[in-house]
Image: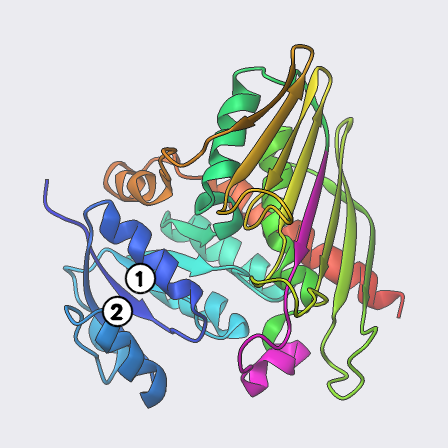
Amino acid sequence: MTKLRFAAIGINHAHIHGQIDCLVRAGADLVGFHAPEDDLAKAFAERYPQAPRAADRRRLLEDSGISLIVSAGIPADRAPLGIEVMRHGKDYMSDKPGMTSLQQLAEVRRVQAETGRIYSVCYSEHFETRSTVKAGELVAAGAIGRVINTTGLGPHKLKNLPRPDWFYRRERTGGILTDIASHQCEQFLFFADALDAEVVAATVANRANPETPELQDFGELLLRAGDTTGYVRVDWFTPDGLPIWGDGRLTILGTEGTLELRKYIDIAGQPGIDHLFLVDRKGTQRIDCSDVELPYGRQLIADIRDRTETAMPQARCFKAMELALTGQAMAELKQ
């Protein structure tokens, strides 16, 4: 089979590296990139010397040999680019959030249905986290019975690296629930085995950063899909003393057991990442996830070739963003 050729347009967030690397690991070829920012382009070219910089993004969009465009541009620009990509007959992988308004989502859904192209959002806290992939295998195997609740926590450090001006502008990021909580919304749908859900309650706030009034440093959601519920909390309050950017966690409650994921650090515990704990009727155990495959890149390449939906159903991709965007709008309406 001919290798999949892909290109990057928009590299404003470092998540672009994970997006590219998951495809390259699976055998795809990065053949070009476009970025108007010279400083970002310089660092990108040093990391991926095989990919020449295109001065005009149209050269990449109009190249019939390129099947997929990936982007981690400024969040508000991702949906318009994705629409342009699909109208050029190509598939698209966006960093999360895949769009920043319900209006953008409606337009993306319309164009995706018209073109039949793949519009994938790389929810990295699922697809690039071995403990989450393993937890999915365990739930599918019935290890904790029927899932009745998930609790997803997405804390982040605010000042662990320089933030560009657009980061503090609500119009450009979509707000904290749109951005960060889309991860947890996707995981809720995945573990609830649902393609539909509702937002029961939502909150956003700026609790401690008055100098940047458009920044929302706290957000929470309550979700429901049938008789399965989920709670989400995201924030920018990770203390400086934590040696990483955030103690992301997920707890999955089942009728016959629980799973707890300490994805990036086990504070005061064992070193490393992807700590997964199973508690069931037999006892407690820590599960090694170091050898778990991350299948998203491989599956997406196969989907592009076969026109299938093995990496993620298109409906779940869009519904996760719909939940986050709906929660964002609901929370801001109350302010």
On screen, residue 38 above or below 138:
below
> In percent of the image, x 59 and y 16: which residue is there?
143
> In percent of the image, x 72 and y 66: which residue is there?
237
Q: Check disc 2 and report the residue beneath it.
A: 61
Q: Amino acid at mark 2?
A: Leu
* Quadrant housing the C terminus: bottom right
Question: Helix, strand, or loop for circle 1?
Answer: strand
Is residue 123 visible in the rendered image? The answer is no
Question: Helix, strand, or loop for circle 2?
Answer: helix
- Residue sitting nearer the eye, 40 or 174: 40
- For the record, the magenta segment spans 150-171
* Dots 2, 1 in contact, CB < 8 A: yes
Circle 1 packing at 10 Å, graded few (<14), some (14-19), many (20+), is: many
Q: Check disc 1 and report the residue beneath it.
A: 69
- Residue sitting nearer the eye, 242 or 250: 242
Q: Could you say which disc has been placed on residue 293 in the image? A: none
